Image (cartoon, helix red, strand yellow):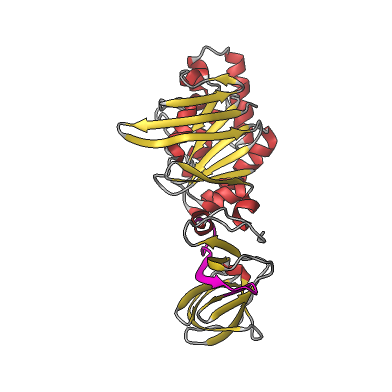
Amino acid sequence: MSNVHLRKLCITRGNNEIIRDLDLEIAPGEFLVLLGPSGCGKSTLLHSIAGLIDVSGGAIEIGGRDMSHADPSERGIGMVFQSYALYPTMTVEKNMSFGLRIAGTPKAEVTRRVRHTAEMLQLGALLDRKPAQLSGGQRQRVAIGRALVREAGVYLFDEPLSNLDAKLRAELRRELKLLHQRLGSTMIYVTHDQAEAMTLATRIVVMQGGRIQQIGTPAEVYDTPANRFVAGFLGSPSMNFIDGSIDATGCFSAGAVTLQLARPVAAGAVTLAARPEHLRIDEHGPLQASVTLVEPMGNHQVVWLDCAGQALSSIVHDARPLAAGQSVHFAIDADRVSLFEQSTGNRLQSGMP
């Protein structure tokens, strides 16, 4: 296991500044996920750690050593790319052992590592097959195995599951988490998929525009988003945002939506945000809306509401009959809302969780 420390990292391409003055410390054995939309700089950051992209400023330390300008082979990393990048004419065993053989690793050690890794990834019976004889999930396991046989200090994953169907993604996501638990290795994982980030990470780094927006555990990032971007990016459906104001008594109001806040907050214009699961359809609720759409999701329903022109979503965990055009009452859990400054989008800290 190795730690990774990025200090004032800057990356430019031509006249475009991709990353500026980025500081990030990744502890040994951590599973850190870089999460954000396309173009936010997460893959660029990962490739700079791998040594595939030159940095224009700052430092990259791996295992306490400055690797800012070291060759990829010197960094002690294993990398899994989005594409499988397997040699089609080689067997699974040859694909997994290729890097070790090129590096001159003794044959007995190559065999030991490949066999051990293949058993961990359930590839033991497939070592003599070629990539064309494998499923997509099996090919991705081979790509992961090729990185693991290096027994590196840090493993880097660049959206490795994005080319797989939903069922395979869920299966390999579970296997990756179990693999990390067994190995205890330092892993840095790039994705735009919030489900992957929430299930895999010990900490999530949310990025936008080459900047870190928030760092925290999955629960911290989900429950207490640092700004409106983070709040809107995590969650499906995303948070309900309501622009309004708080009066001197601590009551939030925005048209037909009113809510007495659980904790004192300074009066003024704010954006109130509530997760759909914290907006409860209840016949005794103080607020009223009409149902515009119902999305059955198997174990729950997503119900879309119109409250005097304000679009809202609610997650209902029972099978109650709800239909478009129906009038319903609802309540918002005042203990679970977030408040953001309208001018900056930053979270209001005073008196809120």
Residue 229 locus on image (x, y percent):
49, 55
- The answer to if 169 sits in the magenta stretch is no
Q: Residue at x 56, y 35 (%)?
A: 24
Q: Residue at x 58, y 55 (%)?
A: 225
Choose between 89 and 176: the one closer to the eye: 176
Residue 344 locus on image (x, y percent):
48, 56
State whether residue 207 is above or below residue 294.
Answer: above
Q: How many marks?
A: 0
Choose between 205 and 92: the one closer to the eye: 205
Residue 264 locus on image (x, y percent):
67, 66
Residue 313 locus on image (x, y percent):
52, 72
| Image quadrant in which you'd find residue 154 | top right
Q: Which residues are magenta?
A: 233-252
Question: The C terminus lies in which quarter of the figure?
Answer: bottom right
State whether residue 246 is above or below residue 202.
Answer: below
Choose between 101 and 132: the one closer to the eye: 101
Choose between 327 and 207: the one closer to the eye: 207
Say whether residue 84 is visible: no
Q: Residue at x 63, y 26 (%)?
A: 2
Q: Is residue 135 left or right of residue 201?
A: left
State whether residue 103 is above or below residue 5.
Answer: above
- The answer to if 241 sits in the magenta stretch is yes
Say whether residue 100 is visible: yes
Question: The N terminus lies in which quarter of the figure?
Answer: top right
